[in-house]
Image (cartoon, rainbow, N blue to C red):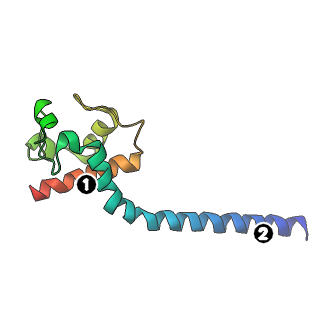
Amino acid sequence: MSARIKEIAVKTTILSILACALTASLLGAPAFSQSSVKSLYEAKCQTCHGATGLANSSIGKMMKVKPVTDPSVYNMPDAEMIREVREGAGKMEPYKDSLSDAQIKALVDYFKTFIKKN
């Protein structure tokens, strides 16, 4: 087999592997957004923000966390909310070192669903 044919075979194999990886990651995305984000919210956010974003937990009340029904919360642009989760805000710790950008965005999207429910 000539060097050129080997080179083409290697490139084709690499492209096939990348295509498979991309497909697998896209197929896995809905599963993350549906089930894992709820568990992640329960683990990282619910203690202060409450099960439905009303900040009605004892810690949420003690720390004076604003509920999702507060205009300053429900009118907050997604980018600002993502920044606050990433960098921390008030007494909330920053999550940039423990959560990925995708996880933070998913948490903000999940939290924003409480606006519609409340």
**Badge 1 local density, few (<14 within 10 Å), some, or many (20+)?**
some
Q: Residue furthest front?
A: 58
Mark yes or no: residue 75 visible.
Answer: no
Name the residue carrying label 1: 110
Quadrant location of the N terminus? bottom right
* Residue 17 in the image: above or below residue 38: below
Residue 83, percent from left and from top = 31, 38
Under mark 1, the amino acid is Tyr
Residue 97, percent from left and from top = 42, 35
* Residue 18 in the image: above or below residue 102: below
- Quadrant assignment, res 8: bottom right
Q: Nearer the viewer, residue 109 or 38?
A: 38
Quadrant location of the C terminus? bottom left
Mark 2 or 1 closer to N-term? 2
Residue 9: mark in rendering: 2
Q: Residue furthest top?
A: 91
Under mark 2, the amino acid is Ala
